[in-house]
Amino acid sequence: MQPILSMESITKRFPGVIANDGVNFDLHAGEIHALVGENGAGKSTLMNVLFGLYQPEEGKIIYKGEEITIDEPNHAIKLGIGMVHQHFKLVPPLTVTENIVLGSEPKRGLKFDKRKASKDVEDLSKKYGLAVDPKAKIENISVGMQQRVEILKTLYRGADIIILDEPTAVLTPQEVHEFFDILKELTKQGKSIIFITHKLNEVMEIANRATVMRRGKTMGTVNISDTSPTQLAEMMVGRQVLLRVEKAEAKPGKEVLKVESLSAMDDRNLSAVNNVSLNIREGEILGIAGVEGNGQSELIEVLTGLRKPTSGEVFLNGKKITGLTSKQIKNHQLGYIPEDRHKRGLVLDFSISENVILGIHNRKPFAKGVNLNYNEINKHADNLIEKYDVRCPNRQVHVRSLSGGNQQKIIIARELEVDPVLIIASQPTRGVDIGAIEFIHSQIIQARDKGKAVLLVSAELQEVMSLSDRIAVIYEGEIVDVLDAKEATEEKLGLLMAGIRNNEK
C-alpha cells in the first residue's frame, strides 16, 4: 500500500543536540500509527517538523505523492494536517462553536454568521460522532469534551491527518474508551491518525502500527498484531524491561500519618481541599487516584508545609504538625518527592554532591560548625550515585545536564537516605523513561517493605493500581472513597474519578 505521507531521513538539530537523526516515518490512509519512545527520544520534534513548527536541516516530506516543504502551521493546516497538542489551545470564556471556527469564521457580509457557524459545528459533530454542545462555554465543560473540541477544530479546517500528542494524559478510563471509539470512527471515514504516546497498553489497544524512536533515531516500525508491550519496551530502552510491579503482601504496622477533616484554598482563593480525612500505616502504600487538578497538588502542599490549611489537623507519628514550616515537618522524618523536580526538588546549577544534601546540609557529618564538610559530602554523593544507579560523568556535574530519569534518581536517593518514617511521592515517574520507572518503582516497594509509610500521588492510573495497597480517589478536593487495591478496577476507579459514587450508579 502506498503511504499517504512519508518522512524520509529527517534530521533536526538544536544547539548541542541532534533531536532527529535521519528519522524515517510513514503513514497509510485510514490507519492509527503510534509514535512511541522515551521522553527526549525525538517524537514531538518529528511531529513539530511535520506541522511546520520546525524546519529540518536534512530530509524530505512526501505527502499524497508530492514532495512538499511545510513552512509554518497554517501551511500544514491548508494541506490537511492538523495537530492536537498535549496542552489544549482553547479560549475558556468563548463557546464551543466560537473556539472551533476561530480564525476561519463564516461571514454574512462583513459580520460573523453565528447561526451558520453553530449549524456547521453541529453537522460536523454528528458526522464524526463527536457529540458536543455548540453553545457551552469551554470553561464549563469537562476535559474530555475540550479534547473533542480540539479534534473538531482540526476537522473543521479539513484535516485528513490528525496528530495527537499524549492525548489520554488528562482523561478518566471511561473517557479513554470513548475517545478510542471516536478515533476508530474517524479512521472508518478515511482520516489517518498519528498517536504520540508512552503508554504501551494503549498502543496495543488502538494502533495498527507503531514506530519506535530512541535517542533521536528510528528503531523500527512494527505491526501491532506481530508485537507485544515487552518487545516495544525493549526497542524503546535497548534492553529487557520488567513492565509489571512485583511485590509481596503488605504487612501494615502502626499508624504513621493521620489527616482529619483537612481543608485548604488554592492560589485563586477557591476551595481546593475539602474536608479530607485519611490515614497511612507503617509498611503500606496509600495511592491517591484522580484526574489532575482535583486538589492533589494542594493536599500535598499542606502535608509538606508549603500551604496553610483553612481547617483540620495533620498528625505524623502521633505528633501534630498542622501549620508547621516545611523544614520543621522534614525534621519529623518526612521524605518528599515533589511533582515538579525542577521547581521544588533540585537546584539545577548545583552539582550532584550539593543536591544530595539539600535540606540536610546543616546536619552532621555534612556540617562542621558553620562550614560544610566536603569530604563527607563527596563520599555521600559517590555512595548514592552507585547505590541508586545515577548515570553521570562524576559527582561534580551540574544536575541540569542529566536526563530526567537521573535527576529523579538523585531526589529519590536524597529523600530515602534520611530514613524517613513517611515518604510522600508525588508524580514520582513523570517525564521519566521506562528503565528509570522500573528502578523507581522497585525503590518505593523496598521502602514499604522496610516499614515506611508511603503516600503516592500519580496521574498514571496503572502506576497507582500496581504500587498501592489501598487507593483513595479524590474528586473536586474530596476523598470520595478508599478501596483495597485488590478490589479496585479501572472501571470502579474511573467512575469515582468522575465523581460518580457507588450509590449513584
Image (cartoon, grey):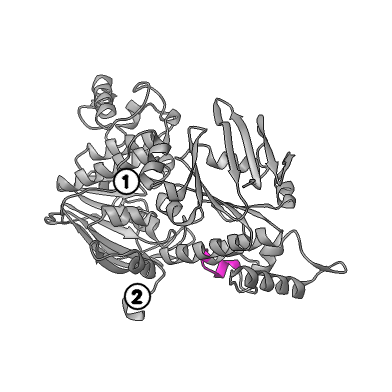
x and y percentages locating residue 411 in the rendered image: 33, 38
240 sits to left or right of 172: left
Taking the magenta stretch, the answer to whether it contains residue 74 is no
The residue carrying pointer 1 sits among few (fewer than 14), some (14 to 19) or many (20 or more) residues within 10 Å by Cα, namely some
Is tag 2's residue or tag 1's residue first in the polypeptide sequence?
A: 1
Tell me which residue sits at (33%, 65%) in the image: 473
Q: Is residue 139 magenta?
A: yes
Q: Which residue is mark 2?
A: 501
- Amino acid type at circle 1 is Leu
Cα–Cα span, label 2 and label 1: 31 Å
Which residue in the rendered view is the most extreme toward the front?
Answer: 1
Q: Can I make out residue 413 in this image?
A: yes
Q: Secondary structure at mark 2?
A: loop
Left or right: 163, with 303 as reference point: right
- Picture coordinates of residue 399 (x, y %)? 41, 30
Position of residue 391 relative to residue 476, above or below, is above
Please state which of residues 454 and 442 is positioned toward the viewer in this rendering. 442
Q: How many marks?
A: 2
Disc 2 marks which amino acid? Arg
Residue drawn at (24%, 40%) of the image: 416
Tell me if mark 2 has few (under 14), some (14-19) or many (20+) residues whose alpha carbon lies within 10 angstroms of its own: some
Residue 383 placement (x, y as % from top left)? 24, 26
Q: Is residue 95 visible?
A: no
Q: Is residue 457 left or right of residue 134?
A: left
* Residue 468 in the image: above or below residue 61: below
Secondary structure of residue under mark 1: loop
Q: Identify the magenta region.
A: 138-144
Q: Residue 6's quadrant in the figure? A: top right
Q: Quadrant of the C terminus?
A: bottom left
Image mark for residue 243:
1
Give the main secondary structure of the magenta stretch. Answer: helix
